[in-house]
């Protein structure tokens, strides 16, 4: 039996996230819902949780929703949930910071308005929509690919133990 390489799995997951965006979900929903199930969250609730983060957090044009969707996955995997567990909190913060740097290296910024080149809150709605359709699928794919490298790296570290 032939197994899928990590590369093809990553590509298919990134494509799944892009397809979710193209079905009408926002960028944060697309990234978050693609990975949530493996961390114990069902897709329906993931779509609800991430809904308000699209458009740079509620169309405020702040942090890109594809990025915040990935941040949520990092939190699901590593986030602090025991009061005294500051190691998990620090791990999560470091991973979020590393993710942001990698996304910025590909796209120059994590800011939605800067990525789209238009104020999505008060800009022309038709032009905003056109920009989102043209630009956001690539951003969703970038975020998913970077997230995949994080998840694969951690899996290979665990396998080495």
Image (cartoon, helix red, strand yellow):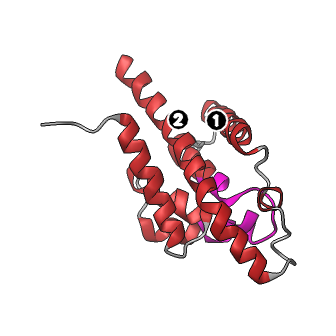
Mark positioned earlier in the residue sequence (2 or 1): 1
The C terminus appears in which quarter of the rendering? top left
- Location of mark 2 (residue): 150
Q: Is residue 161 visible?
A: no
Q: Residue 131, labelled with which disc?
A: none
* Callout 1 crowding tier (Cα within 10 Å): few <14, some 14–19, many ≥20: some
The N terminus appears in which quarter of the rendering? top left
Residue 106 position in % (x across, y down): 69, 41
Residue 142 position in % (x across, y down): 59, 47
Q: Secondary structure at mark 2?
A: helix
Residue in the picture at 61% in, 63% down? 27
Q: Is residue 35 above or below residue 108?
A: below
Q: Is 33 contained in the magenta span? A: no
The segment highlighted magenta reads 50-69
Left or right of residue 155: residue 124: right
* Callout 2 crowding tier (Cα within 10 Å): few <14, some 14–19, many ≥20: some
Q: Is residue 129 above or below residue 72?
A: below
- Location of mark 1 (residue): 95
Residue 11 position in % (x across, y down): 43, 46
Contact between labelled residues 1 and 2, with CB atoms less than 8 Å apart: yes
Q: Nearer the viewer, mark 2 or mark 1?
A: 2
Nearest the viewer among 85 and 101 is 101
């Amino acid at each position: 039996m032939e197994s899928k390489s990590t590369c093809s799995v990553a590509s298919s997951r990134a494509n799944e996230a892009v397809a979710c965006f193209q079905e009408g979900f926002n960028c944060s929903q697309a990234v978050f819902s693609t990975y949530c199930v493996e961390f114990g969250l069902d897709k329906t609730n993931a779509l609800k949780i991430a809904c308000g983060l699209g458009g740079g957090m509620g169309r405020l044009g702040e942090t890109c929703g594809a990025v915040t969707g990935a941040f949520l996955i990092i939190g699901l995997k590593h986030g602090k949930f025991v009061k005294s567990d500051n190691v998990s909190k620090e791990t999560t913060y470091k991973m979020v910071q590393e993710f942001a740097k990698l996304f910025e290296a590909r796209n120059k910024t994590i800011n939605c308005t800067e990525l789209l080149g238009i104020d999505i809150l008060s800009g022309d709605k038709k032009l905003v929509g056109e920009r989102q359709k043209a630009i956001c699928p690539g951003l969703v794919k970038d975020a998913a690919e970077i997230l995949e490298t994080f998840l694969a790296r951690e899996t290979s570290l665990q396998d080495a133990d």
